[in-house]
């Protein structure tokens, strides 16, 4: 995704397209990275840390009136943060008639099932064929808060992870759902087939995660990283592997894959965190099974599930 810039000489017309987001860092945010604070305290207007980092790179963020140059800048309680958001242009993407299962939709939200192998939104190397392209074809409206490359996108799944996803169809819904994510009131459960057998029937993994210091394409357990908590429960044992229900209390990049690998039970089919004997599973054996949230308009608690495509697959045992 390439964020738009708004040089001063573009004139009054362009200035009218911009939206200003401003906040004062609360006591709870003192010491946080700027990109994290921008995501946490923007009221949902900046939907992710990566989006925040892009805005900072484009010179669209100021701290106490001075241009912010680094995403890693540590802000302090009482600091004033101002951010200029480019005007969202959801129609810049091409609607494509791609297979997409829609579980539910109304004027505010949609719940869909993302297939394995589909990227969520356009980015370098994936200009189309994404979930966003499919959403633009199948749905009648999407929120614009995520910018032109991410209309309607409130959260993401890895390319090779299948399963249920929640989509915002208007800005009001997007703000509400982003707030629920920030408050950790959205409940997500996954199905995962992992290598080997667990010593216990259930457990909790509380290990911080950060970018790997040796491979920037990977994440890793790191005491200096961000809090990451995963709950797991055994559902079924196969000859050489185990089917788990996994409930994440935080949403870090590759969280389940990193945490299970750290226990010595990597997810089958994982080309990044799996060892040689678990990679040949045909696909990443990770599926977003269910999501529970409060409807952004009515407040009703809603729960949706997407049946796991490999849950009853006897071939889930992996290879020797």
Image (spheres, rainbow, N blue to C red):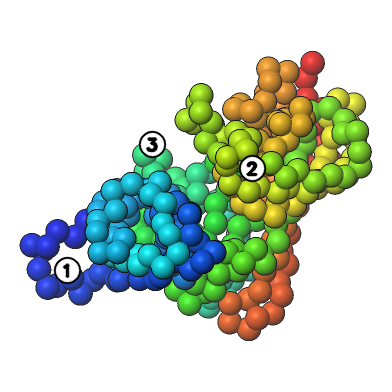
Residue 180 picture location, percent across and down: 60, 68
Estimate the spatial distance between the alpha carbons at disc 1 and disc 2, rounded to whole Å: 42 Å
Mark toward the start of the polypeptide (1 vs 3): 1
The image quadrant of residue 273 is top right
The image quadrant of residue 304 is bottom right
- Is the residue marked by circle 3 packed among few (<14), some (14-19), or many (20+) residues within 10 Å? few
Instruction: Assign a secondary structure to mark 3.
Output: loop
Q: Residue at x 63, y 83 (%)?
A: 298
Mark toward the start of the polypeptide (1 vs 2): 1
Q: Nearer the viewer, residue 138 or 131?
A: 131
Q: Which residue is mark 3?
A: 125
From what the image shows, is residue 184 above or below residue 254?
below
Q: Are marks 2 and 3 in contact (CB under 8 Å)?
A: no
Q: Which residue is mark 2?
A: 208
Relative placement, left or right, of 178 versus 3 is right
Which quadrant does the C terminus fall into?
top right
Residue 42 picture location, percent across and down: 43, 67
Estimate the spatial distance between the alpha carbons at disc 1 and disc 3, rounded to whole Å: 29 Å
Q: Nearer the viewer, residue 128 or 52?
A: 52
Q: Which residue is mark 1?
A: 14
């Amino acid at each position: 995704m390439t964020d738009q810039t708004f040089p001063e000489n573009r004139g009054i017309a362009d200035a009218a397209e911009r939206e200003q987001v401003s906040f004062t860092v609360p006591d709870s945010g003192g010491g946080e990275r700027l990109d994290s604070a921008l995501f946490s305290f923007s009221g949902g207007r900046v939907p992710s840390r990566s989006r925040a980092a892009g805005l900072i790179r484009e010179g669209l963020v100021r701290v106490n009136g001075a241009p912010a140059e680094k995403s890693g800048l540590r802000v302090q309680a009482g600091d004033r943060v101002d951010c200029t958001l480019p005007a969202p242009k959801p129609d810049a993407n091409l609607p494509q008639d791609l297979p997409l299962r829609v579980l539910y939709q109304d004027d505010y939200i949609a719940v869909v099932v993302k297939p394995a192998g589909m990227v969520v939104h356009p980015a370098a190397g994936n200009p189309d064929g994404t979930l966003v392209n499919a959403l633009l074809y199948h749905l009648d409206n999407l929120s614009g808060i995520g910018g032109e490359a991410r209309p309607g996108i409130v959260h993401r799944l890895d390319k090779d992870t299948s399963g249920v996803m929640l989509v915002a169809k208007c800005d009001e819904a997007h703000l509400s759902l982003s707030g629920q994510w920030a408050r950790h009131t959205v409940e997500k459960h996954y199905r995962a087939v992992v290598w080997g057998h667990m010593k216990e029937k259930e457990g909790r993994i509380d290990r911080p995660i950060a970018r790997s210091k040796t491979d920037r394409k990977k994440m890793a357990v790191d005491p200096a990283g961000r809090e990451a908590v995963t709950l797991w429960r055994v559902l079924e044992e196969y000859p050489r592997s185990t089917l788990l229900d996994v409930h994440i209390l935080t949403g870090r990049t590759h969280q389940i894959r990193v945490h299970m690998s750290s226990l010595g039970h990597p997810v089958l089919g994982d080309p990044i965190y799996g060892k040689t004997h678990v990679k040949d599973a045909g696909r990443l054996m990770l599926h977003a099974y269910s999501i529970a949230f409060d409807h952004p308009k009515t407040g009703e608690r809603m729960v949706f599930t997407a049946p796991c495509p490999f849950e009853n697959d006897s071939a889930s045992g992996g290879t020797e």
